[in-house]
Amino acid sequence: MRDRTRNLVMAYDARRLDVADFRQIRARIHALAPDIEVFLVSSRSPALSDVRKVAERPTLVFSPTALSTFRPMRGKVYCGRAMKKSEQMARLAAVGVSVPKTAVLGPDTVLDPAEWGDYILLKPTAGSESHGKGVQLMRTERVRYIAPEDYPPGHPGRKGPMLLQQFIDTGSRPLHYRVSTLFGEALYAYASRLIGERPPLDAPDDVLESACVATNGGERDRFFYEDEEIFALARRVYEAVPEIPLHGCDILRDARGGRLYVIEFNPRGNTWHFSSPRGGGAESREALGGRAALVGQLGAFDVVARVLIERTRAEAE
């Protein structure tokens, strides 16, 4: 076995994932790349001895989420970070990735149906959007600004501005695709479809505006898929934001013309759903058959090992 010449640091937040995943990936990397030493370091409470030892060789640091209190002494760093949806959309649109037209709803907002289409999705920027709360479909002509204090108690609109998004009609049973990528390589891919049907678009306003239209807001089916067109689009998303390694791309397909749109890519990195302990990720994992099914769909841990070996050899410093 030749001497190790490079270090790879896999930093983790134990609140977001089970470090056992990283141990399995480390074993794969050590078997395939005898030139790389792999360190597992807590991003929240790193051991000082590890921080110093890592600095002895050219290093690459990978973390799905922000590094928190871990401050590497050397090395190229790839980690997650928070990014406003408006910035996400701007980064994607700048490289030609199709995104729904999006804006923050303000007191002076006036929408032209000729520009936005006949229907709008109103979405919160804070609170419980991850569970579909506060997401509302309405006719564009009916959109009006509501002051935060005028929303009912518990509505996420009281905590932050509301976002306007061009409505992409995915069919009578709303459907969205999730593909998780690491440096643009697909790790898993599943879709979510509401079990109940959305009201027809010519329904009365009160029916339309009270309907569940977010696929994460109601009872839904989840199923694995493989679609090279969607995977290629996810690779373009990574190319638009290459400094963030782990993306959870949410993608819609227009039911009429088949065009794909990216609605977000979750750059904070809380999409390591192989072992995320709670929330929608854990629910989806169990609905899809558990951790082994999610890892096995596309051979995720083998993909991670291969990609991190390539990056470490090319970019450790």
Image: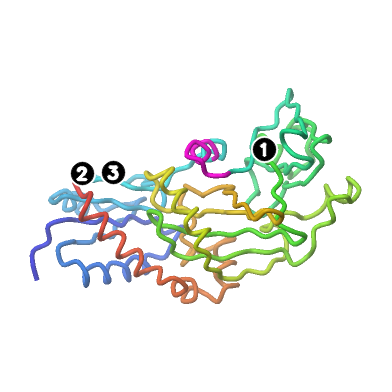
Q: Which residues are magenta?
A: 89-98
Residue that carries the numbered disc 2 in the rendered image: 74
| Vertical arrangement, residue 311 with respect to residue 160, above or below | below
Whether residue 67 sits left or right of residue 145 in the image: it is left
Task: Name the residue beneath numbered marker 3.
Answer: 71
Residue 191, horizontal then vertical, whole percent: 60, 64
On screen, 193 above or below 106?
A: below
Q: For the view shown, which residue lies furthest in the top direction? A: 108
Residue 93 part of the magenta-drawn span? yes
Residue furthest out toward the front: 257
Q: What residue type is disc 1 on?
A: Leu
Q: Secondary structure at mark 2?
A: loop
* Mark nearer the viewer, 1 or 2: 1
Q: Secondary structure at mark 3?
A: loop
Q: Is residue 55 magenta?
A: no
Judging by the rendered image, the residue that carries numbered circle 1 is 163
Q: Pinpoint residue 259: horizontal percent, then vertical percent.
A: 62, 52
Given residues 171 and 10, the one toward you in this image is 171
Please, what is the dominant secondary structure of the magenta stretch?
Answer: helix
Residue nearest the viewer, comparing 284 with 119 = 119
**Residue 170 image-quadrant placement:** bottom right
